[in-house]
Image (tube, rainbow, N blue to C red):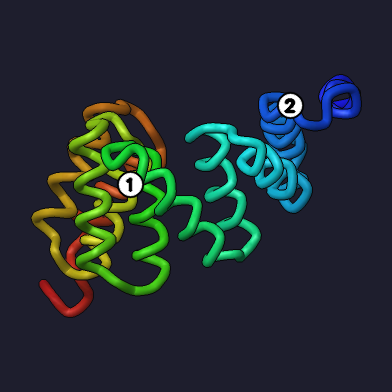
Amino acid sequence: MEFARQAVALAPNDRDGRYALALVLDAKGRAPEALIEAGRAVALGAGADARLLQASLAMRTGDVALAQRATDETLRVAPNDARALYNLGLLEQRRGHYNAAREAYLRALRADPTSYGARYNLAAMTNAAGATDEARHHATLLLRAHPGDRRATELLQSVNRPSEGTH
């Protein structure tokens, strides 16, 4: 981390240095500081990766409005960015907007069929909503793409578990 801080001290207006420092801070579990540095990188003109990091950090630190702005801006310049569409799904799901979240996750999967997060969240969300066939479909695809994955296995088992009150 000291190397990244020294690099920023030598070139405080280097957007890539600010982005790198944000990544290091995030990896060290210092999300609030990382969010500040990601914001500085974005303000200096850093691209989609910095904006997506900013959105993710904003969600994790509870700044939903900033997460929405960063996600919207990414989608404005890259409307098929799977990571931004996944973030949009998270934001919509957090708001309880099932249809909008489902559509965002499906768009993310069209952009990147290997998106673990979009597939997992879509399966879990549809399962919670009682759309068992759709949940099973996505959980099965997830486990097929990630054989032996514990979370995917548990999700598929949950989908296949009989509902309470059925025999």
Does residue 158 appear to the left or right of 8 in the view shown?
Answer: left
Helix, strand or loop status at disc 1: helix
What's the residue type where badge 1 is placed?
Leu
Residue ID for mark 1? 85
The quarter of the image holding the N terminus is top right
Between the C-alphas of marks 2 and 1, the distance is: 28 Å
**Residue at x-position 28% and y-position 61%:** 101
**Residue at x-position 36% and y-position 40%:** 77
The quarter of the image holding the C terminus is bottom left
Corner quadrant of residue 114? top left
Measuring from the top left, give residue 151's x and y in whole percent: 40, 42
**Residue at x-position 58% and y-position 33%:** 46
Which residue is nearer to you in this view: 79 or 138?
Answer: 79
Does residue 97 appear to the left or right of 48 in the view shown?
Answer: left
Measuring from the top left, give residue 102's x and y in whole percent: 22, 58
Q: Please identify, in this view, whether the residue under mark 2 or under mark 1 is nearer the observer.
A: 2
Q: Residue 14 carries which label?
A: 2
